[in-house]
Each structure stands twice: as C-alpha cells, then as structure tokens.
Amino acid sequence: MSGLHVVLGATGAIGSAVIAELTARGHSVRAVSRNAPAGSRGFPADIGTIEGSTAACAGAEVVYQCAQPKYERWAQEFPDLTRTVLAGVEAAGAKLVMADNLYVYGPVDTPMTEDMPHVATNPKGRARAEVDRLILDAHQAGRIRATLGRASDYYGPGGVNTTIGPTVFAAALAGKTARWVGDLDQPHTVAYLPDIAAGLVTLGERPEADGRAWHLPAAEPITGRDFLGLVWSTAGGKPKIAGLGRTTQRLLGLVNPVVRELGETWYQRDRPFIADDSAFREAFGPVGTTAHAEGIAATLDWYRTRRGA
C-alpha cells in the first residue's frame, strides 16, 4: 500500500504515534489538525466541518481518525464529528481506521472480546457506541471501507492527557507521590502508545481487517501497584504511591471537570478491566508488544527530556 495516509488529530498522543509508525514503515503521510503548521506534511483543517474534512481527506488511500472532542464533550460532539469525517473519507474513496476504546461494553465481569454486546448506559459509552454504528453502517452500505482498533488506557512518550501520564511519571521524577486512578490491586489492561500505533497501521494496511472492530495488542494486564512499582524501580528514589479512590474522585470532581467525568465509568477502575486481544493476534500473525518495564523506561526518558526543555 503506497498511497497517501492521512492522520486526523495529528498533534494528539495517538495521532503523533501513528505518524511515527507510518513514517517508519515508509508511507506517505499528511498530518492534519486544526492548528497544524502548513508544510510538507502538515495540513491545517477544521474536520468538524464537511468542507474541512473533505479537504483534509482529499487524495487519501487510508484515513486514521485519531481526533476527538474534549472528554467532557464526547456525548454532545462525537457523533457529529464522526459524520463529518465519514463525509470526507467517502468523498476521497478512502479507507477509515478509527482509533477506538472500550467504553461500548459497559461494566463487565470477564475479559472483553469484540463480540460482546454494546450495553453501556452512561453518556460516553452510548456516544462511542453510536460512533461505532455510524462507521460500520457506512462500511456495510458500501460508502467507505472501515475498521476500528480498540485500546484501553494508554501511556507512553507524548502521553500527557491520560490517567497514566503526568500524575504517574512526572510525579515520580519529581519525588512526589505517583497516583493510580482506581483500585491499586485490580488487574488492568494498559496500552503503550507505540503499540497502539503499530496496531492501527496494521489495520490500515490489511484489507482483511475491514468491516469490524479489533482489540489492539497490549502487554499482559497489570495492577496499579505493580505498574507504579516498575515506575519507581526505574526512576529511582523512595517509592511513594497512592490509589485515587471513589470518594477522593468525587471530592476532586467538585473543582476539576475532567476528574468529575471519570465517575461515569468508575466500573473500569474498581474491578478487573481486561481486553482480550487474541483475535488480532490470530488474524495478523505474531505480534510483538512492548514489555511494561521497557515502555515505562522509555516514557520516563521522555518526561525527563520534557522537564529539561
């Protein structure tokens, strides 16, 4: 596949990682965001409008949708954003790869698989389910070709707007308490940003990926306590860790709207939250994922560089 690969939301954590992966694989890339500097790859556009989306996607063979509204505006804005993106992808005759998450399933008691029903009742889960329906309906109607790659909470170089970001890595480097959102002792699938990008680009390259959602490969589930232990063993210093419980989340949410929004999906934090990625591995062959220790070391290095900038 030698055509143009367009990344929407190119300046975000996932979009930036996808650009790096595409570049490493030798693809031609257009990096789209509202404030992108115009240049050899940068393309400024407002993809919230049909005109902007059409211009951004023009000439594309594959479009990676990594853009999203503010977290607290998902329910109000995500479906309409998806409609404008679909219009641009359809006008280009391109394939769409959606950077998705696990919200559609709602509370679960077993590892999540792609064939589970979409029973989320919270506003964000319902919005993500509507987004997925819009995309797969467009694929089934023959308007576009599409696939979705779902990932859990992520961390990695460039990951700052995530629960596994500054309050973990920057805090540890500063000798402060590293905080895990939720129960420290529940196993949780966490995704490393370059692994997410590799999975999404594979979906973009492979026609057999079309027409369905896939759980992107990630390292084995890990508890917050063990994850923070790896952070401190790599960062050095006297370990200081804490779990952000539901009561504290409610109190902080009184003054912090992003923290307040986390309460809607607290079921992802108080019990095992595990994604089964075996379907991807079986379909696309052996897949290498980054060990937690290696990903944590690389992320700490990135935060050190950022701190010294």
Image (cartoon, rainbow, N blue to C red):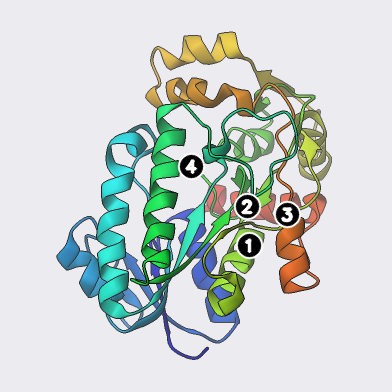
Q: Which mark is residue 161?
A: 4
| Furthest residue in direction left, as rendered | 51
Residue occupying the point 56% across, 31% down: 106
Mark 3, residues whose alpha carbon is within 10 Å: few (<14), some, or many (≥20)?
many
Q: CA distance from mark 4 to mark 3?
A: 24 Å
Element under disc 1: helix
Q: CA distance from mark 1 to mark 2?
A: 7 Å
Residue occupying the point 53% across, 39% down: 118
User: What amino acid is at disc 4?
Assistant: Asn
The image quadrant that residue 301 belongs to is: bottom right
| Furthest residue in direction front, as rendered | 141
Residue at image mark 1: 194
Q: Position of residue 303 (x, y in %)?
A: 60, 49
Q: Position of residue 275 (x, y in %)?
A: 70, 45
Marks 2/4 in contact by CB < 8 Å: the verdict is: no
Disc nearest the viewer among 4 and 3 = 3
**Precedes in sequence: disc 1 or disc 2:** 2
Query: Image height check: is 45 above or below 226?
Result: below
Residue occupying the point 53% across, 26% down: 265
**Precedes in sequence: disc 4 or disc 3:** 4
Residue at image mark 3: 277
Element under disc 2: loop
Q: CA distance from mark 3 to mark 1?
A: 16 Å
